[in-house]
Amino acid sequence: MGVATARTRGRQRALWVVLFLLAAQLVSLARPAYACGCGAMVHDPKTELAVDRETSVVQWDGRTEQIVMSLTVNGTAPDAAWIMPVPHRADVELGDPALFRQLAAETSPAIEQRHYFWPRSRDWPFGGDMDGAAAPAPGAEGPGVGVVGRERLGPFDVARLTASDPDALRDWLTSQGFRLPTALATELRPYVARRWEYVAVRLAPAERTRTLSGTLEPLRLSFASERLVYPMRLSRLATTPQSLGLYVLASHRMEPRSAIGGSAPEVFFAGRIRPTKAIRGLTGPGSAYLTALDQHFPKPRRISGDHELRRAAADTPFQRVQYEDVLLKVGPLPAWVLVVGAVSALPPTVVLFVLLRRRRTAPPPPGQLPHPPV
């Protein structure tokens, strides 16, 4: 009895350990990232806000760069601020949501069929039949911070800022109701030293009683740039692994100069396209080369700077291939049915052929002369 009780208690302790570890894992998965791929998302520390998905489009013609970004967020925050450094003064407007749907269609995998002979579980006679087989506006200028523009764009209040001191920028944003950690001012220092400017966006749902949730309207930033750069330094503040997905539209195939502390960037599409509709609204008339990249940052603290993209050695096209397995048919019938039918009919045919051949070559009965040769 004592042994049984000890075993029961041992199982209970093991169960509690498993439940504890599972709960810890779930909490770690639920913890929101502080920064998204190309800026810092700041909210009240008493609330939570997670960026579930970030999709960005970058277009560069050699002189002007455009970034269109759409965020899908989830959490308990009623509002938040998003900060993005840019090398020159930016124009900000709402983007076209259709742009992302069109680019997803352009970069979708090519479908190729692979035929198989023997029927599978979904095919006849196992299954199926014989026929068949998608807020308040930012405040006024403060010491060390210049407000060079302010717009109300849909659900966004957008301030375009200059800052000669990262601490002053942090203080200005704090005066708007957001408590920024000291680490953010530290990460902003390289941008201040290079005299970059900033876009500060206040996000708020249409109804004050609601929280930020779902896919936000895309924002489109345009600024002068002699090189194609994608700001990433602020993502060093993230506490969870980060993912970056980029659609790059330029004259040629583009590639990052380095991995900047993440995994090797993976190209999942490269090719020249003829822009139409929303893509043409971004690139203008004429062809454009589209490069689609995907990169992961398991340890964001290792991010060493911003992504700078350069022209690749060659405009080599690439497209993923998705194979579709299809039952091999001859006309409306599966090939295996015809072959099995032919094989099944083979033995009687062979027997009949052998009997006929024996009849022709058999000797005549006794007393009967063979037919004279002709």
Image: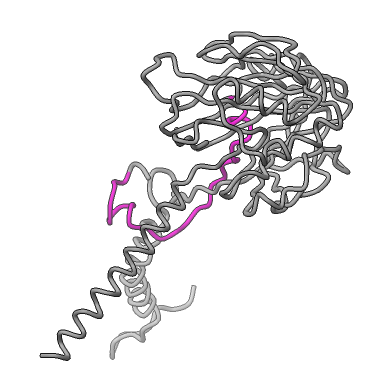
Q: Which residues are magenta?
A: 102-130
Residue ID at (68%, 45%)? 236
Q: Nearer the viewer, residue 359 or 363?
A: 359
Colouring scheme applied when the structure was drawn: one colour
- Left or right, 130 with respect to 229, comes to left
Q: Please determine whether, in this image, residue 131 is positioned above or below residue 286.
A: below
Residue 311 position within the rendered picture, expressed as x and y whole percent measured from the top left = 86, 37
Q: Nearer the viewer, residue 112 or 74?
A: 74
Quadrant location of the N terminus in the rendered image? bottom left
Residue 37 position within the rendered picture, expressed as x and y whole percent measured from the top left = 64, 37
Residue 105 lies in the magenta-colored region: yes
Identity of the residue furthest to the left in this view: 1
Residue ID at (43%, 44%)? 331
Number of marks: 0
Q: Please determine whether, in this image, residue 357 is positioned above or below residue 178.
A: below
Residue 115 position within the rendered picture, expressed as x and y whole percent measured from the top left = 50, 53
